Amino acid sequence: MSVKVRIPTILRTYTGGEAEVTAEGATLSEVIADLDKNHQGIAARVLDDAGKLRRFVNVYVNDDDVRFEQGLQTPTPDGAGISIIPAVAGGSGA
């Protein structure tokens, strides 16, 4: 299954500056493995040492948050759009 993956600015150093790349895989786990094969090092920024999604990284498959779907086993149908969105931390300072 071929999918389009939207890459956040902070991870574009791994994709040569590309904001969107194509990846292959029937599940999110397979897509991340394919991404890492073609853009070495990106998986380490998305997955923790245990191989799970990092706490401060949100991933959506066709606008569905994978944390509320099947996590890394979420199906990625052909033509799906995947968004990797790092959580933004901050405060008002007040």
Image (cartoon, helix red, strand yellow):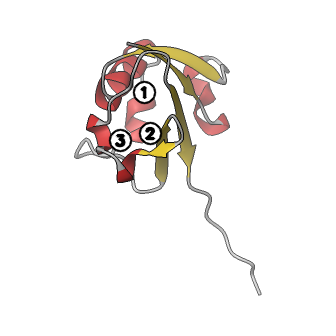
Mark 1 or 3: in front is 3
Number of marks:
3
Residue shown at 51%/34% (left/top)? 62
Disc sitting over residue 47 in the figure: 3
Report x, y in % for residue 24. Answer: 39, 13
Q: Nearer the viewer, residue 43 or 6?
A: 6
Label 2 secondary element: helix
Report x, y in % for residue 70. Answer: 28, 44
Quarter location, residue 9: top right
Report x, y in % for residue 34. Answer: 36, 17
Cα–Cα span, label 1 and label 2: 7 Å
Quarter location, residue 78: top left
Residue labelled with disc 2? 45
Q: Are marks 1 and 2 in contact (CB under 8 Å)?
A: yes
Q: Is residue 65 left or right of residue 73?
A: right
Label 3 secondary element: loop
Label 1 secondary element: loop
Q: Nearer the viewer, residue 82 or 89?
A: 82
Disc sitting over residue 41 in the figure: 1
Give the position of the N terminus as an image quadrant: top left
Residue shown at 31%/44% (left/top)? 71
Q: Residue furthest bottom?
A: 94
Q: Amino acid at mark 2?
A: Arg
When the figure is inspected, residue 44 is found, relative to residue 80, above or below; the finding is: below
Cα–Cα span, label 1 and label 3: 10 Å
When the figure is inspected, residue 35 is found, relative to residue 47, above or below; the finding is: above
Residue shown at 30%/30% (left/top)? 29
Q: Amino acid at mark 3?
A: Leu
Give the position of the C terminus as an image quadrant: bottom right
Q: Amino acid at mark 1?
A: Gly
